[in-house]
Image (tube, rainbow, N blue to C red):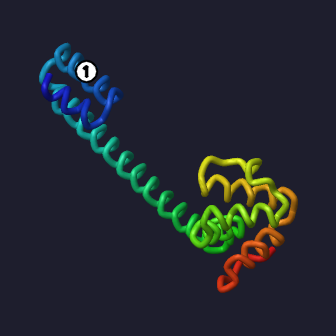
């Protein structure tokens, strides 16, 4: 039984079923089939191990490929919305944001969000939907002119 548990750990239920079937055959036909049974169990275990290792290698290769692709895509795509949001968050305080909202024509109380980041994303989202991101970037750039702000 201990050997059956070891096989279950190594190979799963298919190998356990084969192992139990071979033990039934061994018990029925005696010791002459034991060496053949043992050889078949060894072959099944080796096959399972080889297939598992190949599967693991395939997964590793696929993950490495996907990571390289993600990295290449990330390097190629610039996101002006995120760049503008980061710059606004890093260089403007809430008072500056209120002034930017007013200059853009927004009532601060109607700008969605409970905190600075949410308010920034709300303003950027609205400017992007109105195809006026460059206007918002210019307004923000006027508040902190030393920075290079993303343009449309």
Nearest to the observer: residue 22 or residue 54: 54
Task: Sort mark 1 into few (<14), some (14-19) or many (20+) by Cα contacts within 10 Å.
Answer: few
Question: Does residue 73 appear to the left or right of 29 in the view shown?
Answer: right
Could you tell me which quadrant the C terminus lies in? bottom right
User: Vertically, is 31 above or below 68?
Assistant: above
At a point 30% along the width and 37% down the height, the residue shown is 44
Nearest to the observer: residue 63 or residue 31: 63
User: Vertically, is 114 above or below 144?
Assistant: above
At a point 66% along the width and 74% down the height, the residue shown is 76
At a point 53% along the width and 68% down the height, the residue shown is 68
Could you tell me which quadrant the N terminus lies in? top left
Q: Secondary structure at mark 1?
A: helix
Which image quarter: residue 43?
Answer: top left
At a point 72% along the width and 54% down the height, the residue shown is 122
* Residue 134 position in % (x across, y down): 82, 72
* Residue 149 position in % (x across, y down): 71, 78
Q: Disc 1 designates what residue?
A: 20
Nearest to the observer: residue 122 or residue 14: 122
Question: Does residue 82 appear to the left or right of 128 in the view shown?
Answer: left
Which image quarter: residue 135?
Answer: bottom right
């Amino acid at each position: 039984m201990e050997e059956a548990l070891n096989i279950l750990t190594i190979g799963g239920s298919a190998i356990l079923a084969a192992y139990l079937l071979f033990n039934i055959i061994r018990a029925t036909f005696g010791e002459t089939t034991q060496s053949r049974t043992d050889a078949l169990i060894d072959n099944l275990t080796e096959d399972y191990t080889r297939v598992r290792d190949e599967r693991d290698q395939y997964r590793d290769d696929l993950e490495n490929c996907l990571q390289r692709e993600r990295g290449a895509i990330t390097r190629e795509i610039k996101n002006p919305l995120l760049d503008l949001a980061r710059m606004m968050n890093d260089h403007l305080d809430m008072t500056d944001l209120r002034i930017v909202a007013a200059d853009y024509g927004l009532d601060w109380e109607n700008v969605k969000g409970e905190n600075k980041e949410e308010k920034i994303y709300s303003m950027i989202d609205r400017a992007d939907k109105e195809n006026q991101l460059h206007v918002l970037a210019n307004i923000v750039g006027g508040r902190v002119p030393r920075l290079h702000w993303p343009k449309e």
